[in-house]
Image (cartoon, grey):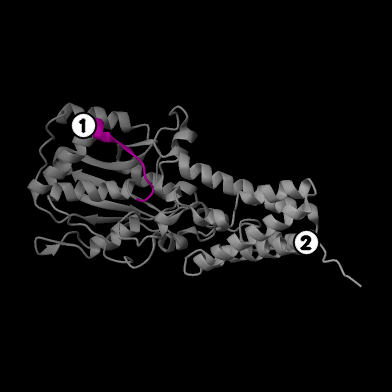
Amino acid sequence: MKTVIFKKTLFILFFLSSFIGFSQSLPLSPDAKISVLTCGLGNETYSYFGHTAIRVADPANNIDIVYNYGAFDFRTPNFVAKFAKGDLQYFIITHPYADFINEYSSDKRSVYEQDLQISLPLKQKLFDNLNKALFSEERYYTYKFIDKNCTSMVVDVINKSLNQNVITKKEDTDKTYRSILFPYFDGHFYDQLGTSIIFGTKVDQMGTRIFLPFELKNSLEKTTFQNQPLVSKSKTLLEFTKETPKSWWNNIYTYLFILLFVILARNKTVDKIYFLILSLMGIFFVVMGFYSFHQELAMNYNVLLFSPLLLVLVLFSIFKNKKWTYRFSLINFVLLVVYFLFLINKAHFFITLPLIITSAVVLVRTAIRNKKPIPIII
């Protein structure tokens, strides 16, 4: 989701504070409009899923600003560690609408607008809540991929202003979060593979929460409030066709080629390197599962495929301990079978199946190499 901090933000804060103060907002005129903006998908990691923001436009007060809950500061000390751990603070900022729309036009990303069809007092209450958040400690929140992001925060502030849980998810509630995410990685194969294997059981839950921008857009279209549609018909402010990137390496073909090479090489060193890579990834998954506050990374059953026990197998193989190399080959093969059976009904079954097959072939091959021959008695 979009996280660029515009230079004019401080100017807007100064402009608003000069009229608003910290406890009372500028009274909106009857012509004021508040709308939800949904921004299209991009090809940068932060933009794969789109973005959500709120626009407040009041010509009588010369206001046309966008409230954006998707900002963070790259200058935060230990930024990478905080992001990985899941305690990085995101915050709400504002942009001039003209700058906001120009930014997305420059990035060639579509923008859609849905006007909230609510009374002036409710618009005022929403405006007050946005500014209260902007000028207080409510400005900050701890980012969570599913539970707290730029989209869920918009849902929360609107529902809070309407005094009820008006906006709820209206479609795909019978799909898992993992299944919902899959189409968003079109043209980014290794990102799709990476998220498939680093996410644990939470993303296999049914996707009952609105957490993606276009989920919110589609749900708003089907939401009513006080016996009328909550939003007007969606307007297209910018329209671009997303260009799917083409890469000679970021595709399924290089993935299959590498795994096919491992199978056909029939080389002990190649097998050890393969197992070493998988085991180190498994150790990383385990560490992140305990270290990170991101619930999506916890309880990651993919460690059955990326088993840390493969490292033990590699060490026994290096020290030419045939007995224990054989035994750990069998142990890891059993874990692989359990993983295969558990994964059959999961969204990422087919993308991980080549890895499962490769691991099975190499484990069987390693076991055969190290199996103690049966003595023949004549």
N-terminal of the pair, mark 1 or mark 2, is 1
Q: Nearer the viewer, mark 1 or mark 2?
A: 2
The residue at 39%/53% (across/down) is: 50
Q: Are marks 1 and 2 in contact (CB under 8 Å)?
A: no
306 to the left or right of 13: right
Inspect the image, locate mark 2, and give the three-letter code of the amino acid beneath it. Lys
Q: How many marks?
A: 2
Q: Which residue is under mark 1? A: 16
Q: Left or right? Give the position of 146 relative to 12.
A: right
The residue at 56%/56% (across/down) is 304
Tag shown at residue 371: 2
Which residue is rendered at x = 16% and y = 44% of the image?
A: 126
Residue 209: x and y in percent read: 30, 57
Q: Is residue 111 left or right of residue 347?
A: left
**Can you give x and y, in whole percent of width and height, for residue 248 in the image?**
66, 57
Camera-side residue of 362 and 225 = 362
Q: Residues within 10 Å of mark 2 (few under 14, many from 20)?
A: some
The magenta region covers 137-146
Measuring 79% from the left and 52% from the top, which residue is drawn there?
A: 269
12 left or right, relative to 178:
left
What is the secondary structure assignment of the residue under circle 2?
A: loop
Is disc 1 surrounded by few (<14), some (14 to 19) or many (20+) residues within 10 Å? some
